[in-house]
Image: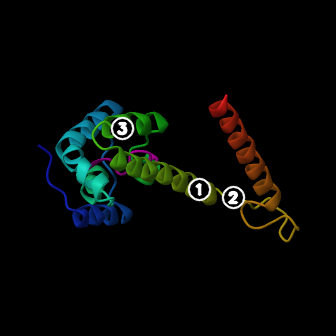
Amino acid sequence: MPETVTPADALDRVRTKKRGTAVVRMELGTAVSAAREIAEEVLRPQAAAVDTEQRWPAEGMAALLSRLGGLVVPEHSGGMGHGLLAVAQVGEATGRACASTSICFGMHLVGSAVISAQARRRAAGAVPGADRRRGAPDDTGPVGARDGRRVLAAADAHGALRRRLSCG
C-alpha cells in the first residue's frame, strides 16, 4: 500500500526537487503500475465526489505528483525522461478510475514537457520568437496577428466541417 501523501507533502517534495534532489528514474512499466495503484487506492474512491462537487482533485493530484510528477521531465533536468507514450499510458490507467483527475494530471505532464523543452532551448541560446522582427505591424507577441488569423481560420473551417457532418 503506498504511503498517504497530503497536498502539502507533495508540494514540499516538488520544492525539494527544485532545489536539486533528482526524481528517481522509473521504467515505463513500473510508472504505469504505480499509476494503476494510485488510481485504485486514491482516485477511484474520490471520483464521484470530485465530479459531483466540481472541485479540484487535490488528493489524487498530490498522490500522482508525489510518485510520477517528473515523468516527462528530461533526466538531465532531474526527471524520469519519459515521453508522450508515458503520458498516454498513465492517462489511460488513471482515466479508468477518475477522468477529472486524469485530465488534470495529463495537463500537468504536458505543461512540464513544454516548460522543460523551452528551458533547454533557452539554455542553448535559442529563445522562442527571437527570429521575429520586433515592431512589425503583425507582431502581437510570441504569436503574431498573421499567425492568429491562420489559427482562427483553421478553427472556423473545423467548426464548419463539424456542423456539416453532424447535420448530414
Numbered tag placed on residue 81 in the rendering: none
Q: Does the CB distance between marks 2 and 1 fall below 8 Å?
A: yes
Camera-side residue: 16 or 139?
A: 139
Q: Would you say 127 lies left or right of 84 here?
A: right
* Screen quadrant of the N terminus: top left
Query: In terms of image quadrants, where is residue 127?
Result: bottom right
Numbered tag placed on residue 90 in the rendering: 3
Residue farthest toward the left in the current orientation of the protein? 1
Q: Earlier in the sequence, mark 3 or mark 1?
A: 3
Camera-side residue: 40 or 22?
A: 40
**Residue 88, horizontal then vertical, whole percent:** 43, 35
Q: CA distance from mark 3 to mark 1?
A: 23 Å
Numbered tag placed on residue 128 in the rendering: 2
- Which region of the structure is painted magenta? 67-74
Q: CA distance from mark 2 to mark 1?
A: 8 Å
Crowd band around label 1 with a 10 angstrom C-alpha radius: few (<14), some (14–19), many (20+)? some
Residue type pointed to by label 1: Gln
**Residue 59 shown in magenta:** no
Position of 88 relative to 4 (above/below): above
Q: Does the CB distance between marks 3 and 2 fall below 8 Å?
A: no
Q: Nearer the viewer, mark 3 or mark 1?
A: 3
Q: Secondary structure at mark 3?
A: helix
Residue farthest toward the top in the current orientation of the protein? 168
